[in-house]
Amino acid sequence: MADRCLLPFLFPVFFTAVFSLVEAGYIAYNTTPAIVPGKINVHLVAHSHDDVGWLKTVDQYYVGSNNSIQGACVENVLDSVVSALLADKNRRFIFVEQAFFQRWWRRQSDATKKIVKGLVRSGQLEFMY
């Protein structure tokens, strides 16, 4: 019984000791979508999940107001996704909530719409329903 009581105190000591042995530094990851034979291949695809009108109104979710309820600004998500996809051709993103996308789309310039269409054609940006 006494050993069990010590466990909550030993875990922080153990993890502190382990993490102090790890040298911090930049790690470069291979983000290509290629399959590597003989290894477990895991591909993570970022996607949206912004419930339309769940905790806040559609407007509050879209513009990021009333963050005392929940922090969310769908307009910023879409703006940053387009930039991130353009910055790295290996990135992919799935957007689900069409009510938000339609609102965002109507406010975009012709140049941005052309860019987004190119991202869809290339398969970097997908839509699910």
Image: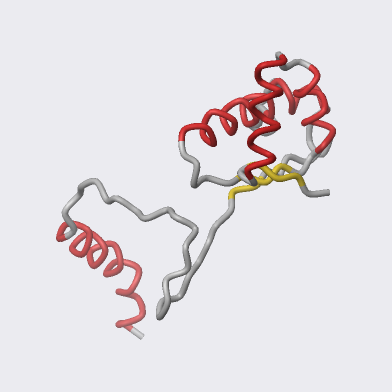
**Up/down of 32 relative to 39, above or below:** above
Residue 11 in the figure: left or right of residue 116: left
Most extreme residue toward the bottom is 1
**53, 69: nearer the viewer:** 53
Which quadrant: the N terminus? bottom left
Q: Where is residue 2 in the image (x, y as percent from the top left)?
A: 31, 82
| Residue 92 shows up from this direction | yes
**111, 79: nearer the viewer:** 111
| Residue 68 shows up from this direction | no
Name which quarter of the figure residue 19 lies in: bottom left
Q: Position of residue 77 (x, y in %)?
A: 62, 31
Q: Where is residue 25 in the image (x, y as percent from the top left)?
A: 20, 47
**Up/down of 88 relative to 78, above or below:** below
Residue 45 in the figure: left or right of residue 2: right
Q: Residue at x 29, y 66 (%)?
A: 9
Q: Which residue is drawn at 47% across and 68% down?
A: 35
The way the protein has been coloured in the rendering is secondary structure
Name which quarter of the figure residue 69 lies in: top right
**Up/down of 25 relative to 8, above or below:** above
Name which quarter of the figure residue 108 lies in: top right
Q: Position of residue 91 (x, y in %)?
A: 52, 45
Residue 26 in the figure: left or right of residue 78: left
Q: Which residue is drawn at 79% across and 30% down?
A: 100
